[in-house]
């Protein structure tokens, strides 16, 4: 993640307390070269707080639910 656009920004930028802060973080993540790996890191480690890979906590929960459903279907 050394190439992340977030590397020189304060961590608080990615742990906002409101929707405006989430949008600010998303804009930073939008064209980040490590956006995908960052998101996967958060998903694999079940990180509940903050903006990771351009996604909010709620969006990551949705991704995890969808992946669980897809895994269940493919196993069934």
Image (cartoon, rainbow, N blue to C red):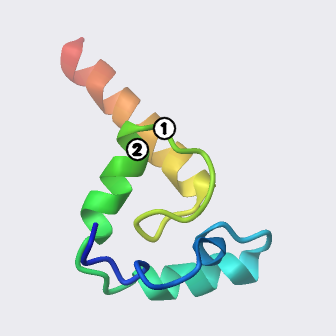
At x 21%, y 14%, the residue is 75
> Residue 24: x, y in percent?
60, 86
Residue 58 placed where, x, y %? 62, 53
Residue visible at 25% across and 78% down in the picture: 3
**Which residue is at the front of the view, 16 or 19?**
16
Label 2: how many Cα within 10 Å (few below 14, some 14–19, many 20+): some
Task: Please tell me in which quadrant of the rendered image residue 32 appears.
Answer: bottom left
Q: Position of residue 36 (x, y in %)?
A: 27, 64
Identify which residue, 71 or 29, lies in the foreground.
Answer: 29
Q: Which mark is residue 43?
A: 2
- Image quadrant where residue 56 sits: bottom right
Judging depth in this view, the residue of 68 and 9 nearest the camera is 9
Residue plotted at (74% across, 75% down): 19
Outermost residue, top side: 76
User: Looking at the image, is 30 positioned above or below residue 51?
Assistant: below
Q: Dots 1 and 2: beta carbons under 8 Å?
A: yes
Q: Using the image, determine if residue 73 lies above or below residue 28.
A: above
Horizontal placement of 76 versus 25: left or right?
left
In the image: residue 4, left or right of residue 55:
left
Q: Is residue 64 left or right of residue 59?
A: left
Q: Is residue 35 above or below residue 65?
A: below
Provide residue 51's location: percent of width, then percent of height: 55, 65
Q: Is residue 52 above or below residue 75?
A: below
Image quadrant where one finds the N terminus: bottom left
Q: Quadrant of the C terminus?
A: top left
Instruction: Please tell me whether mark 1 sits on a helix, a strand or a loop.
Output: loop
Give the numbered dot on residue 46. 1
Question: How many numbered discs, if any?
Answer: 2
SS at circle 2: helix
- Residue at 79 percent across and 69 percent down: it is 17
| Measured Cα–Cα span from mark 1 to mark 2 | 5 Å
- Residue 9 vs residue 29, the one in the foreground: 9
């Amino acid at each position: 993640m050394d190439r992340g656009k977030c590397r020189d920004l304060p961590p608080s930028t990615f742990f906002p307390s409101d929707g405006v802060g989430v949008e600010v973080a998303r804009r930073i993540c939008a064209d980040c070269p490590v956006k995908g790996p960052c998101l996967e890191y958060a998903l694999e480690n079940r990180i509940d707080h903050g903006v990771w890979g351009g996604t909010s906590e709620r969006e990551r929960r949705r991704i995890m639910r969808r992946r669980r459903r897809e895994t269940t279907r493919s196993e069934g």
